[in-house]
Amino acid sequence: MDAPLLIKNALAVLPGGMAPADVLVVNGVIKQVGASLSAPGAEVIDATGLTLIPGAIDPQVHFRDPGMEWKEDLASGSRAAAAGGVTGFLEMPNTQPPTTTTALMAAKKEIAARKSLVNYNFFIGATPAALPDLDTTPNVCGIKIFMGASTGTLLVDKMEDLDRIFARGRRLIAVHAEDEALIRENKARYGAATKPEDHGLIRSPEVALRATQNAVGLCRKYNRRLHILHLTTQEEAEFLAKEKAGLPLSSEVCPQHFLLPAPDCYRTLGTYAQMNPPLRERRHGEALWHALKTGVIDCIATDHAPHTREEKDKGFPHAPSGMPGVETSLPLMLNRVNQGLCTLTEVVAWMCANPARLYGLKGKGRIEAGYDADLVLIDMAREKMIENGKLQTKVNWSPYDGWKVKGWPVITIVNGHVVFREGQFYEDRMGREMLIDAPWEHGRAFP
């Protein structure tokens, strides 16, 4: 048995709000939350001047393992997560080979057990042909459907195939909502495009809206639990505001889609700003932020999708789409708290509690007795520059290079063990597979 861990004198974000609190951890689980706690023999962390939050959960990352480890792997990606205050992630299936079967899922989990510093779960990928394993592979956070082709080989774009997947099973379906037919039409129209900003013409707002509408229609038809990944348009946010009530439906937004407006992002970053769906004009970012603040959008993800500088420097349209983000998402949101644009309680809802609830992650997302001790101590007054070359992601660049950010994680605790502290990593313990306890998989209502 491990010695208990006692966090003293923190300002904690608790389910009922912010309050001074001590937290006692025993065997990786929160045993007690209260005032003036003591525990003989415990390791004590004095959190005076720091704020304690549940560990962030990033519900959409691409850690490229197996098959593309030169971009990222589960070791480097999870270190980046820990440095950014992320104690758990949900990883996507477009690896090499794609994670589309029970056997491939088991192999990926075995890699994670050896390499991941933080907790993990994985999506299984849908193809038109592969149906049985989608619903029978054990302990999977969801089925990922690419309705439009992106950086991998997975694609399900025909309505009859989508209908068949939605019609069977109860597992959560997460969709990359871009309409492939309309993408192809736009490629024919803008086939000579050579500027990164033309990416938004090919993958237009109409591309995203049409796919989102189709996915929501299937959600309604089959009452199937649906999560729409990385919303990017004002039109989608307005559509969901009207359609969401009464449906087992949720959605997310990535920070870059309200922090990096076009066309400025393409002028300053070129293909380093290229991703799917694209970064868009300011009106979209403002609408997405409003939808997040008002509860139309439920949570924040990063779509962390790193590519090397050599790959990104190939120019448009040859450079791959995607950018890193898992290491900087929480600090960027803490910076917005310091700017008065949102509250820390809201950030904890968007990045900790809601991802756990939306995916049915057992024991995650709250500072409460009985919950897993995935915790982050943050210094809301600390200012630091995001700098290329000083990051944990293997590609070692960020679209936020040169941004001064106020509010940073200083200690990250996973399953009751410190894994990151003031720039140092402690890798004697690996993270664990997060368990799914989703009510909709048992025929109960989406909460």
Image: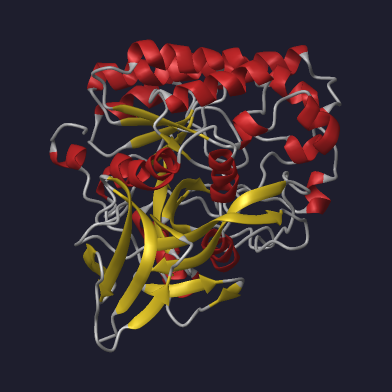
Q: Residue at x 67, y 44 (%)?
A: 323
Where is 96 relative to 266, above or below?
Answer: below
Q: Residue furthest bottom?
A: 41
Q: Residue at x 78, y 16 (%)?
A: 190
Whether residue 319 is visible to the viewer of this picture, yes or no, is no
Q: Nearer the viewer, residue 13 or 438?
A: 13
State left or right for residue 90 relative to residue 447: right
- Picture quarter containing residue 192? top right
x then y, percent, for residue 342 = 49, 34
Q: Residue at x 55, y 34 (%)?
A: 340
Q: Residue at x 21, y 32 (%)?
A: 446
Quadrant containing the N terminus is: bottom left
x then y, percent, for residue 419 = 48, 73
- Picture quarter containing residue 45? bottom left
State left or right for residue 446 relative to residue 194: left
- Picture quarter containing residue 166? top left
